[in-house]
Each structure stands twice: as C-alpha cells, then as structure tokens.
Amino acid sequence: MKQIIPAIKGTRDFYPENMAVRSWLYEKIKQISQRYGYQEYDGPFLEPIDLYAAKSGEELVKEQSFVFPDRGGELITLRPELTPSLARMVAQKQKQLVFPLRWWSFGPFWRYEKPQKGRSREFFQWNIDLIGLNTPEADAELLSVIVSFFKAVGLSSAQVKVFVNDRKLMEDHLNLLEIPPERRSNVFRLIDRKEKMEFREWENYAKDEGLNSSQISGIVNLLQNTELWKSSPNLLRIFDALDTAAASDYIEFDPNIIRGLDYYTSTVFEAKDIGGTVRRSILGGGRYDDLLAAVGGDPLPAVGFAMGDVVISLILQEYDCIPSDIFSHPAQVLITTFSAETFTHSLRLASQLREKGVNVVTYPDSVHLNKQLKYADRMQIPYAIILGPDEISADMLALKSLRTGEQSSIRLSEIDEKLIPLLAHKERLW
C-alpha cells in the first residue's frame, strides 16, 4: 500500500467535527469578549525573535520557539504568544489610539514543546487585554471575563477555579528573606516550577540557584500561607470587585501562582480544572505594566490573559459541555436528481433557494433515489426535495422530512409562502 505522508508532529487535522468545536468555541469567546466591550484584532504570524528575547523569558525564546533565518539572515519565529506583538502594535500607534484600550483575538500559535495530552505544538489561543488602566478593578474586569466565559460554556465553580496572586506581594516577602532584586526572576521561575517537580528535586534546584536553607524554608512557608492576600491592598480591592460582580465563587487566592513570563509586574492568575481528570492549567495572565516601554512606546499599564484551545476543549468534552447541535450539517435541504434532463430543474431550484438564504445541497448524479436519501440522512440534512419528472410536469415539488418520513407536495409558485418557512426552522435528526 502507498504510505500516507503523516502530519507534522504536534499539529492537528481539523475534520468537520473538530472544526465545529473550534468554531463554536470561537463564537463563545467572541460573544463574551464583545459583551465586555472588547474589539477584535490580530497580529502577524511571523515575528523577529528579538521581539521576545528581552520580554518573554529565556525558556520561551531558546527552548519553545520555532526560530529560523529568513533569506536575509534575520532570525524570525512563528509567534509563540501575542502579548509582545500587541505591545508593539499599540506602541506604533500610541498617539492615535483611544485609551483605555480593550482588544481581543483568537488565532494560531506555535511552541516547540513535547506533544502530550492537553499540549500540542500548534494551537489556537484567545488573547484579551485591557490597556491604559492601572487599577485593581481593571484586573477584576479581566477575571470577570473569565468567569463569564466559564458560565457561558457550562463550567461550574466546582469544576474550574481561577487562582490569583500578586507578584509585588511576593516581592515584599522575598525582601524579608533577603533575596536581592537581581535574583527575583530566577526565584519566580523557581516558584513557578514547584508544583511541577518532586520536592527533593525542587529543593536541589533552589540550592543551585544560590538559596540557603533558611531562604528555601521561608519560601516554602510563604507558599503555604493562604491568608497572605489579606495584607495586599491590591488583592483586597480585586476580590471586593469580584464579590460585587457575583464572580467570586470561581476565584481563589494561591501564593504558588507566579507565572513564568518575565514581563508580569503585579497581579497574576491561572485557571485550572479542579473536578475532572485533565487537571491542567486552562489559561493564564496578569498585569504587565512595563512591556509597552520595553518595545519602544510610552509607559502604559496593561492587564490580560491567554487561553489555548487544546486544554479547554478536553475539559469541555469531559464535562459534556459541547452542544450536540453544533455538529449538524450546514445544509437545510438536499435536492434530488433523477436524470441529466431533470438536473437542470434541480439546479435552477437550488439557485432560487440559495438566493433566498437557504443552504442547499444538490446531488449532481442520477443514482437511485434511495441512495440520495440515504446520503442526506447520514449527513444529517433534515429535508429532501424530490423533483422527478412527475413533479416537474405538474410544477410541484415533494418535500420529505428525513426525521419523520412525512412527505408533502408544494407548488413551485408557493415556495415563498410554504417552503421557505419550513426550511427556516431546521429540524434535527436526533
């Protein structure tokens, strides 16, 4: 047998049923984003690696990015994330834009990671950001967006949670442990990896970073203090705003949330599956007040988050949150063909119905009628129009419901009055 060339490792084929889930997810994301007044945008799929080198962290640039030279020798990358692109886009037109800025996007991204359940090398991602406001209430708005999305797709607070922390709060306590500012980035990365490693391995990693036993035990105690948020005016205001917005059921403080990217400056958060078997991070984000200045713009406060489509799709499937009707065929009716001569009439009727907004499939082959009807049934097309010689000579058509088997005759002159209203209310075959 001829060998089929496989897809590139870590990528996905989107068959119609997979595409239906992706499209449904996009529509939910669009609905919630617009409900909060966010505008859709996008950036290039290719970017110079320099855009990420000083902003996103060494691991993302050196280990996770698809980097290659263009013909001019410049190192470029398939975008691994969107926030640096967003910062550059805002910086380029900073004097022309109206702030605060509310933007969202949903598009493809690439990271060179080990493919596994919940993680691929090519993925789609929701990015949403609020730029120009430096208040805890702005952070609370983004958290409220997350909660609204979870509610919209049918996920409860017993199934998913958003865990929140504040880097500035953690910095204050790292100061008490006499950890100097120039080592904060490495210590934050250490904290970010704690739950992903065995404790002994993590402890050795901490020692390799130059921390002494007292500092290590101090960090461990810090990460176990679930009441720490009460000493943060920033978090107190965020949680108060979330209470007012009826979103607090989904929110919880967790000092272990630190986020690995270097550009986060204060509030950070991650949403996770807590009730199922996926047990993975669904999304993550936070405040990044220095990034605009880092790409050449004037300083501007900003907060945002990103959610990939892979983990959330697994979770939605596990909790049976994806509606069955999204998999239905787009056509409302199949018009049958009896012969090459009658196909002209079928094609003319199909064109007439399409002009009136009806989705139509024709069968441009005069195979047996039962085969055509079986095809329509298997494709879950709810109706079939039988247009044979008898119907054509009588200026009629026969409309058959493939769900009930009922059949009725309609004059071609009565299409607007009798046929269109029936097809407008699409039947389901299940």
Image (cartoon, rainbow, N blue to C red):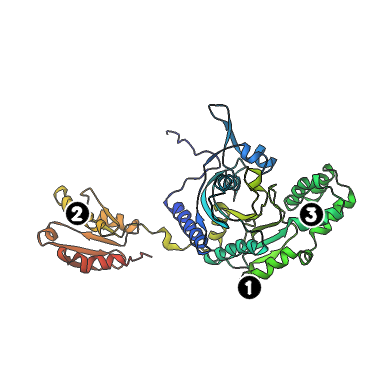
Of residues 50 and 80, the one nearer the viewer is 50
Q: Earlier in the sequence, mark 2 or mark 1?
A: 1
The local crowd at label 2, few if under 14, some if 14 to 19, many if 20 or more residues have their Cα within 10 Å, is: many
Distance, label 2 to label 3, CA atoms, is 72 Å
> Image height check: is 256 above or below 74?
below
Give the image location of residue 252, x and y in percent. Answer: 69, 65
> Image height check: is 243 above or below 105?
below
User: Residue 162 vs residue 168: left or right?
Assistant: left
Residue mark closest to the camera, 2 vs 3: 3
> Image height check: is 263 above or below 331?
above
Circle number at residue 346? 2
**Rendered image quadrant of residue 423:** bottom left
Name the residue that disc number 3 marks.
171
Residue mark closest to the camera, 2 vs 1: 1
Label 2 residue SS: helix
Q: Earlier in the sequence, mark 1 or mark 3?
A: 3
Q: Earlier in the sequence, mark 2 or mark 3?
A: 3
Residue at image point 65% right, 72% down: 243
Q: Give the residue type at disc 2.
A: Ser
User: Residue 5 vs residue 392: left or right?
Assistant: right
